[in-house]
Amino acid sequence: MRRMIHNRLGASVSVGCLLILFLLTGCGADAAMNSPSGNNPQLGAHAVNSQGNGSQGNSSGSQGKQGQQKGLSAIGQQYLIKALRVDMQVKGTRQVAADLQSWIRTTDPRASSAGIDYEQTDNNLYTVSMTFSVQASIYPDIENYLRDYAPQHGGKLLDLRETVQDVTSDFIDTQSRLKNLRGEQDRLLTLLSHATAMGDILSIEQRLTDVEGQIEQIEAHLNALNGQTTFYNISINLQPSEVPATQVATPGWNPGQVLHDAWAAALSLGQGLVTIFLWLVAFSIYLIPIAIIVWFFLHWWRVRNRPAITPAAATPGVSPEQTHRS
């Protein structure tokens, strides 16, 4: 009898254990169904794709890098600074400059001009330089228009150069620094409101002043980056395609011109002689004394070097008068 009771109790315990095991298995299945991966088929597919990409990444590293770059570009925004320079040769540069200015302002009402410079190269021929700041969203349309403008209007596109600068890392880093500094500013303000000791108050205020100064600098830098990435600069240089007119002198003999040139030469010679005379008159105060001194010196030299005349010796039988006559 006791053995039967023990057998029944063992069977009951076994059945109970099986029931508990069945219940636990059902609860685990329900939990698996209620999990985020079970409710979100996209997440499950993402896990499968991740495993697939891992196996493919072992076989092809370049494809994995390309997929990673595409994922990063899709997640975050890219901040670029662009500048465009266009040189073209057209007819009627002033009229073309007015047309381009009107078209850009019509296409982009928020566009601004940094000025227009006109430089005359010949009679009624001008070289025009213009600079505009346009919205980044409208920049591609303006670039395409300027690229095709010269060939479509009988001109020539000389140069089209675009410079691009990626400031994404600088932009994100600046935003992160600004967020951290503003959090520190809030904490300092909270500490300042609860501080009671004068030393603590002065220390917190000094640190708060430094943080606020850094916030102002970072905000200015962030505003500059925002402006440069929102508006792009475009420089346009227009050169005239017309050939400058040159005047060719007609050869020939012109008596009137010859007389005019001769009279002009005579006047020039007369002016030169009068000029020399006036110079001599002005310097006569030095020349006249020098001339007198030179004349006296020459006269004295002649007198000194003149040979002395001695009377001839008297010859016998000859009178002095005869000697003198002879």
Image (cartoon, grey):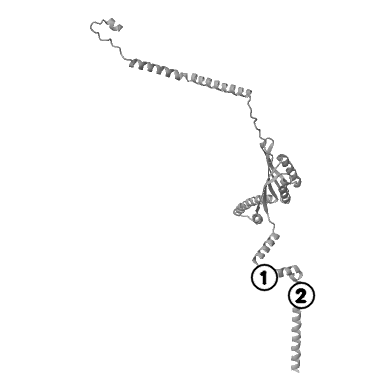
Q: Is residue 288 left or right of residue 15?
A: left
Vertically, is 56 above or below 216? below
- Does residue 189 show up? no
Residue 223 sits above or below residue 246 on the image: below
Q: Residues under labels 2 and 1: Cα distance?
A: 31 Å
Closer-to-camera residue (315/185): 315
Q: Nearer the viewer, residue 23 or 98?
A: 98
- Counting from the top left corner in percent of width and height, residue 229 is at 68, 51
Residue 125 lies in quadrant: top right
Depth check: give the residue in front, 19 or 143: 143
| Quarter of the picture holding the C terminus | top left
Q: Residue 191 carries which label?
A: none
Mark 2 element type: helix
**Residue placed at 75% from the left, 67% from the top?**
42
- Please indicate, yes or no, whether residue 52 appears anywhere in the rendered image: yes
Q: Residue at x 75, y 79 (%)?
A: 25
Query: Residue 315: x percent and y percent?
Result: 24, 8
> Within 10 angstroms of label 1, few (less than 14), some, or many (20 or more) residues?
few
